[in-house]
Amino acid sequence: MYGAFVRAVRQSRGLTQAQLADISGISQPNLSAVEHDRRTPSTDTLNRLVVSCGYELAAVAGERVIHCDLPQNGWFPDEDLPGPVDGDPVDEAPALAPDATVEQRLQAIDAVLDVADERVR
């Protein structure tokens, strides 16, 4: 299900599975299993792979956009996320703060489900 997407993202940056595994901290055998649809990645794993290729994971439906937070420090070998590059777009605030209430989290889940419903139609 996610295999073709992950492979396309990786190949768009000209990376081998081994290179993406090194950057993301996801083992190459696990990455291969994801790309061949033998394993479904968790949201965190999918986000790490996408961000490692220089993209941002977001749900988009028309004007509605819900951004996935960037992975936390600690998954790059040097413990730092790469810095911005001239010409990078301005970062948008995440849809939820880490200290969001249960009600706020439920509203975000409802919004994601609404986006999914719109995409299916």
Image (spheres, grey):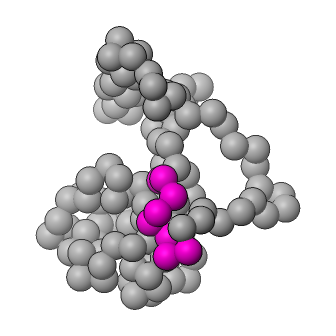
The answer to whether residue 36 of the structure is visible from this angle is no
Give yes or no for residue 70 being in the magenta stretch: no
Q: Residue at x 63, y 33 (%)?
A: 93
Q: Quadrant of residue 5?
A: bottom left
Residue 85, how many percent across, how many down? 78, 63
Q: Quadrant of residue 115?
A: top left
Q: Quadrant of residue 118?
A: top left
In the shown orientation, is residue 17 left or right of residue 39?
Answer: right
Q: How many labels does the image show?
A: 0
For the stretch drawn in magenta, the main secondary structure is loop
Residue 47, how many percent across, how many down? 42, 55
Q: Which residue is drawn at 34% across and 67% down?
A: 4
Over which residues does the magenta segment extend?
Answer: 71-78
In the shown orientation, is residue 49 left or right of residue 94?
Answer: left
Tell me if residue 3 comes above or below residue 93 in the rendering. below
In the shown orientation, is residue 81 left or right of residue 49?
Answer: right
Question: In what quadrant of the picture does the C terminus appear?
Answer: top left
Q: Residue 71 versus residue 53: which sits nearer the camera?
A: 71
Tell me if residue 13 comes above or below residue 62 in the rendering. below
Q: Residue 103 versus residue 121: which sits nearer the camera?
A: 103
The answer to whether residue 16 of the structure is visible from this angle is yes
Question: In what quadrant of the picture does the N terminus appear?
Answer: bottom left
Q: Residue at x 34, y 59 (%)?
A: 45
Tell me if residue 4 comes above or below residue 58 in the rendering. below
